[in-house]
C-alpha cells in the first residue's frame, strides 16, 4: 500500500505505507477516496508545520471500508462502509468535561496532528467511525466530512424556515452551508467574487451577488424589506468578509464565523452595540452532524457530485497541490487512495 507523505517545503512524496494492525478499540480501513480541503492546503503551505511530524501522511476527508477490527470492537465488521470523524479528544480538559469535545483543549485532529487518510490503509480509533449505508456511492461518501462541517454551522446558526441567510464566500464549505440552509427552508444569498465559483453556485440554484459589482448591503436590505439578514455566515476567513458581515445582519441578527482567520482582522464592534448582534464561532463538528450529513449524501439531497472537480491517483498529489496554489478552478479534488 502507498501513502502520500508531506515532508515540508511544499513537497510530497509517495512511498510505501505498510498497514498498521489495529490495537484494542481500533479499526483498520481500506481508503477508497480522500478529499483535499483548505486545511490540507494550509499544511502544504507550511502554516501548520508546528503540528505535523515530518514526514507525515495528511488528509482527513475520506471514504472507505473496514479491513480489520481490533480487540473489543463489536460495532463494525469486515466490509462495512465507513467514514471517519477525524477528531480525538482528551476527555479531561474543561471543554471535554462540559461535553464540548470538538473544541477540546488538547484536540488531536487526525491527518493534522497525527497521520491521515491519504494512504491505502488507515488505522483509527473505532469511536471515530460512522457507518455508511450499503448502497451509498463510495466516491460521494468522501464528501460526508465537509457536509458535516456545513451541518454543524447551520445547526449552531439556528437557521429556520423562511429566515434570510447570507453566506459570504462560495468555496466548498460556503456552498454547502448555503445548500443546507436552503434545505431548512431559508432564503439564501451568496456573496462571491470568483467567476468560477459564482457560476458553480448558480448551477446549484443559489442566488449569488458579486460585491464588486453590486452594493451588497443595499441588495440585502432591499430583499429583506430593510431589515437585513437573520443569519450571516462568514466563510472566507478574510478581512473583507469580516468587514462586510456586520453590515448585513438585522437587529439582533446572528453572525457565524466558519472561515479560519489566520491573522486578526478589524471588526466593527460598534455594530454589535447598535444592533445587539450575536457572534458565534463554529469549529469542526459533533457526532450528530455526521449523522445529519450521511443521509443527505446517501439520498443525494442536492447534486453533491457537482462539487467534485476531478478524481486523481494518489501519485498526482504534488502537482495537484501546486495547481491549487496557482489558483486552479477546482472546487473539490478527490485522491483515489486504493483500488
Image (tube, grey):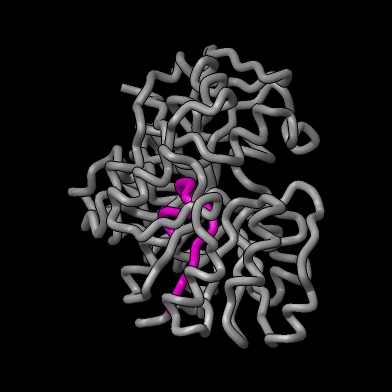
* Residue depicted at 50% across the width and 28% down the height: 118
Outermost residue toward the left in this view: 135
In the displayed structure, does residue 114 sit left or right of residue 163?
A: right
Asked whether the viewer can see residue 3, the reply is: no
In the displayed structure, does residue 188 sit left or right of residue 15?
A: left
* Residue depicted at 42% across the width and 43% down the height: 197
Q: Does the magenta stretch include residue 173?
A: yes
Residue 9 percent coordinates (x, y): 73, 18
Magenta residues span 164-177
Q: Nearer the viewer, residue 15 or 35?
A: 35
The picture quadrant where one finds residue 312 is: top left
Q: Nearer the viewer, residue 139 or 154?
A: 154
When the figure is inspected, residue 285 is found, relative to residue 111, above or below; the finding is below
Q: Tell me the quadrant of the picture where the C terminus can be found.
A: top left
Residue 261 percent coordinates (x, y): 71, 51
When the figure is inspected, residue 53 is found, relative to residue 233, above or below; the finding is above
* Residue depicted at 54% across the width and 16% down the height: 318
Amino acid at each position: 500500500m502507498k501513502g502520500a507523505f508531506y515532508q515540508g517545503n511544499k513537497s510530497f512524496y509517495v512511498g510505501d505505507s505498510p498497514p498498521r494492525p489495529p490495537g484494542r478499540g481500533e479499526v483498520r480501513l481500506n481508503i477508497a477516496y480522500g478529499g483535499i480541503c483548505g486545511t490540507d492546503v494550509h499544511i502544504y503551505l507550511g502554516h501548520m508545520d508546528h503540528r505535523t511530524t515530518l514526514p507525515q501522511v495528511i488528509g482527513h476527508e475520506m471514504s472507505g471500508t473496514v479491513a480489520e477490527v481490533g480487540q473489543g470492537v463489536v460495532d463494525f465488521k469486515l466490509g462495512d462502509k465507513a467514514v471517519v470523524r477525524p477528531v480525538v479528544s482528551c476527555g479531561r480538559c474543561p471543554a471535554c468535561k462540559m461535553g464540548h469535545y470538538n473544541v477540546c483543549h488538547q484536540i488531536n485532529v487526525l491527518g493534522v496532528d497525527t497521520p491521515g487518510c491519504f494512504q491505502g490503509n488507515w488505522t483509527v480509533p473505532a469511536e471515530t467511525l460512522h457507518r455508511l449505508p450499503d448502497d451509498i456511492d463510495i466516491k460521494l461518501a468522501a464528501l460526508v466530512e465537509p457536509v458535516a462541517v456545513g451541518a454543524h454551522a447551520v445547526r449552531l446558526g439556528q437557521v429556520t424556515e423562511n429566515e434570510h441567510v447570507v453566506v459570504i464566500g462560495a468555496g466548498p464549505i460556503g456552498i454547502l452551508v448555503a445548500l443546507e440552509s436552503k434545505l431548512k427552508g431559508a432564503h439564501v444569498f451568496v456573496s462571491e467574487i470568483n467567476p468560477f465559483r459564482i457560476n458553480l453556485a448558480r448551477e446549484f440554484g443559489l442566488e449569488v451577488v458579486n460585491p464588486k459589482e453590486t452594493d451588497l448591503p443595499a441588495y440585502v436590505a432591499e430583499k429583506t424589506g430593510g431589515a437585513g439578514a437573520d443569519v450571516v455566515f462568514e466563510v472566507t476567513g478574510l478581512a473583507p468578509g469580516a468587514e462586510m458581515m456586520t453590515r448585513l445582519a438585522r437587529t439582533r441578527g446572528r453572525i457565524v464565523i466558519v472561515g479560519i482567520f489566520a491573522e486578526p482582522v478589524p471588526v466593527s464592534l460598534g455594530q454589535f452595540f447598535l444592533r445587539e448582534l450575536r457572534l458565534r464561532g463554529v469549529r469542526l463538528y459533533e457526532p450528530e452532524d455526521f449523522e445529519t450529513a450521511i443521509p443527505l449524501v446517501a439520498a443525494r439531497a442536492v447534486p453533491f457530485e457537482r462539487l467534485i472537480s476531478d478524481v486523481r491517483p494518489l501519485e498526482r498529489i504534488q502537482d495537484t497541490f501546486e495547481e491549487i496554489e496557482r489558483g486552479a478552478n477546482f472546487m473539490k479534488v478527490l485522491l483515489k487512495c486504493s483500488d
